[in-house]
Structure formats: C-alpha cells, structure tokens
Amino acid sequence: MQLTSKVLENAEELLKKGYQLPKFDREAVAEQTRKEPEWIHFGAGNIFRAFPAMLMQKLIEQGKGKTGIIVAEGYDYEIIDEYRKLDNLSILATLKADGTVDKTITGSITESLKADPCKEEEFGRLKEIFRATSLKLVSFTITEKGYCLTKADGSYTDLVKADFINGPTKPVSYIGIVSSLCYERFLAGQLPIAFVSMDNCSHNGAKLKDAVLAYAKNWEESGLTKNGFYEYLLDENKVTFPWTMIDKITPRPDDSVAKMLLMDGWEALDGIQTKKHTYIAPFVNAEETEYLVVEDAFPNGRPELEHAGVIFTDRKTVDQTEKMKVGTCLNPLHTSLAVFGCLLSYDKIYKEMQDEELMELVRRVGYEEGLPVVINPGIIEPKVFLEEVLTKRIPNPFMPDTPWRIATDTSQKIPVRFGETIKAYKEEAKKLTCIPLVIAGWLRYLLGVNDSLEPMEISPDPLYPYLKEKLKNAAVGKEMDVHEILYPLLTDKKIFLVDLYEAGLGTKIEGYFAEMTAKEGAVRDTLKKYLHTDGTK
C-alpha cells in the first residue's frame, strides 16, 4: 500500500489492521474549503499534522465543521512537495505509555501551498484565501525563530531590510510574506481575522503581533502601502492576535515506528531530510497527551474547537497556563534532560529517566524550584500536570524523542524556561541549586565535547556562533579564568532575562562550570555532588 487517496478505497482492509479513517467525504470537504475557506495554517511540520489538522478532522467527523484546513509553508518548500506526493494525507501514530499505538489517517488537509511570491499561481491562491470573507483564523507553528526580525546585535536581518525596502509585492522573509497577505485582507475591505500563533513560546500572540506591526508601520511610513493598514491591524474589532499555550510532544519520524507501519503493508515510508534540514515522512509519531489553551478573541468567528478538546479562556489564564508549562512543569525539565543527556551520551530522553542523578535533577527543578513560584491557572492543576510529566510522559519508553532535538535553540528558550523563575524568586534566587546547575551544564555543553571528552554535535541555535566565540578560551582540563570567560554571558539579560550576578547566582554558576570542566567525567561527578544521590546530605 502507498499513502495516496486511492488507499482509502481499501477501507475494510485498513480497518482490520486497526486504522482509524476519515469519516467524511474528502472531495466534498475539499470543494467546500476551496469555495469558503475558514482556516489556513502556516508551518507544515510534524506538530501541525499531529495536532491542528487532527482537531479539524474531529470537528468534521462530529458534523461541527464543513471545511478542512489549508496548510502553507513559507520557509521549507520541499515539505509541500512531500505533502502533494501523499495527496495531503498523513498517518498519525499515537504512542501510548502502555505500549499500544493508535493509528489514524489524517484527511482534513485539503490544500498545501508554497507561500512563495515568485510562484504566481500559488501566491495568487493565497491572496484569494486572504480576501475571502469566510476566513476566520490564520494559525502558525513556525517556531519562535520565525517571529524574530533581528540579529543578535539588535539590527534587522538582511531579509527583513530587503522587505522593508521592497514593500509587500514580493517579500522574502516569513513574516514579510504573512504581512503581505495581511495587506491583501486590508485591501479587500478591512475584513476581520484572528492570527493565532500556536508556537511553543511565551506570549506567542504578542510576538506575532509585534513582528507584523513592524512591517506594517515601516511600509506605511515609506508610502509602500495605503494609509490605514497599520491602524487596521491595531483595531481589535477587526484583527486579533490571541495568545495560546500548546503542549504535545511530537518527535521527528522514528525508524521504529516506520518498521511497525511497514509490517502493516505500507510502502515508501522512508523519511527525508530536506536541504533546509527538516525531517519529514508520510507518518508522524506523537504522544497521546495534548493541550491547547487559546484566548477566545476571534472577530470573524471560529470553528467550534472546544468540541475537539481545545480550552478557550481569557488572556490572563492563557498566560498563567503557559508560564506553568513553559516555566515550571515541562519545558525546564526537557531542557535539563536535553543538556545533560547530550553530555552523558544518551540517545533517547526516556532513558534518562532511568538515570538516578538526572531523575533527581528534574524532580527538584520541577517540585522544589519551580512549583513554589508558579501561579495556578485554575483550568489545569500544576502539581497534577507535573506529576503526569514526570511519571508518564517523559518516561514513556515508546516516545523516541532525543536530547539533541530538544537542545535545539536553547538560547531562545532559556529566558522563559529559567529566567522567569529566577526573576520570581527575587532576592531569594540565590538559594537555588538545580536551575543554576542546568545553566552551567548548558555552558559546558556548548564546548562541544561530552563527559568522556568525545566530540559532540551541537544542536542548531541562532546564537551558537556568538556563544562559541565567547567561550573560545574555555576547555575541559584547561587552566582558565572562569569569571573572565563567563561574566559577559551571565550578565546578558537577552539570554537569561536577568543579570545572574545581580540575582546572586553568577558566582555559583561559575563554580559549577569550573567543576564540570575540571576533567573527564567531571559532569557526572558534579551532578552527584550537588544532587546527593549517594544518600549524603
């Protein structure tokens, strides 16, 4: 069997093999979507197929939605080529902690488009979608980097500068492309719309709004757009940028899952790595647990996603829920495991939960240093959420997630995952042990050798060249002035949100770093010393 529309004609065979199939007429849904599109999503990666696309599938099957979801990609166009080979279908393998697997064919994606202004027909279709009065929401999973318009020194990137000069006709950056399409909606009569970031970052709606507004303001001031475009985006009766909290672990496609699906008779399941280093396959593997909390601000209405499990609430509650997850109960634990997992040569995250020191580390990061300053959002109990993370989600042996993947873009994550907690402690931050230990571990990780002094590949990070330069005089087993090396980094509020010396942690982190760089095996020794897993106190 090959994953194309034709395979759905073999419904009986697929059902016997345990597959859940789309319970609707895909052609009818696609036709309705083409005429009256309601939802377009930017970012065609794995999380999109595993979560937003499945939300829409559930609504259609319940009879609460008549249209599908359109996906557009503005960075890695090869992904769309792969979608089209599969007729926009996908297999979702939900890997449960009890070892069972739910297998679902996702059929709610009706169109896949390259958001490339150079491709006139495709971009013309995008403009048509944005001019449609029926369009209710534009959502995004383009990663936190996607909203960043500046380089490390605060100046605009070359792509953004080019867009500012050239205007909305042929933008090249992701946000430039989105802003150009926003302008189309403005020209169509200032139609209402919600732009919904579903990226895993703090105040994601604000980040998206700031980025789009920067384009609108620059273009309008330069006379490249009609007057009123900027004000249109500021009018919350017409345009909103709801905040969200999303939570679903979706590792890149794993070979073990591919083997399982091949046993069902599928062919051509091999994943590819695109030229832009995106991993994509005909299937997605993901955990069962999922949360999506959304600020209910949709000026043109919205799909009834509450019937698919989405929690709609106010901005304050979204913010508190996001802080609970990103700043306390999940993401800090993941980053801790990612950094030390790489240093201690683990290939899977779940295996780290069988490591005495690492289990103790994340337990204390969550329970002892995170929970005391977290605010209960009221819709999800923090302690219950954390317990689920530590006992079911991260230890799930069937989730093939890797420390290397989670360590990606750590410099962009540190401020929220640790900086906010440090800030919340105020003058009491100096009593923290495990969070500064993780920060020191991250700096040790950036040296590019593991605890056995073997070369180690550093995960992609936009600040890595800058960080590498700052740490060029640091090495394991080398006599060095740790304070001189680390001071410029530990005082950098762009990375840590706070000056770590002012917080009372700078000297402590220097000490941990010095111990971890003393010799081969020093990372493990340092963890044992400060986590006291040998039973001493």
Image: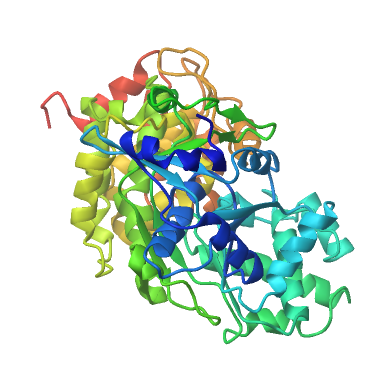
Instruction: Place residue 92 in its image quadrant.
Output: top left
In the rendered structure, the answer to whether residue 518 lies left or right of residue 188 reads left
User: Measured from the top left, where is residue 457 in percent x and y?
Assistant: 54, 22
Q: Is residue 510 visible?
A: no
**Residue 106 or residue 120, whichever sits in front:** 106
In the rendered structure, the answer to whether residue 339 lies left or right of residue 478 reads left
In the image, residue 510 above or below residue 220: above
In the rendered structure, the answer to whether residue 272 lies left or right of residue 255 reads right
In the image, residue 293 above or below residue 458: below
User: Measured from the top left, where is residue 172 in percent x and y?
Assistant: 79, 53
Q: Is residue 194 visible?
A: yes
Residue at the location (76% across, 73% down)? 184
Image label count: 0
**Residue 150 or residue 38, whichever sits in front:** 38
In the image, residue 208 above or below residue 54: below
In the image, residue 256 above or below residue 199: above
**Residue 129 or residue 384, whichever sits in front:** 129
The way the protein has been coloured in the rendering is rainbow
Quarter of the image containing the C terminus?
Answer: top left
Residue at the location (42% across, 58% down)? 55
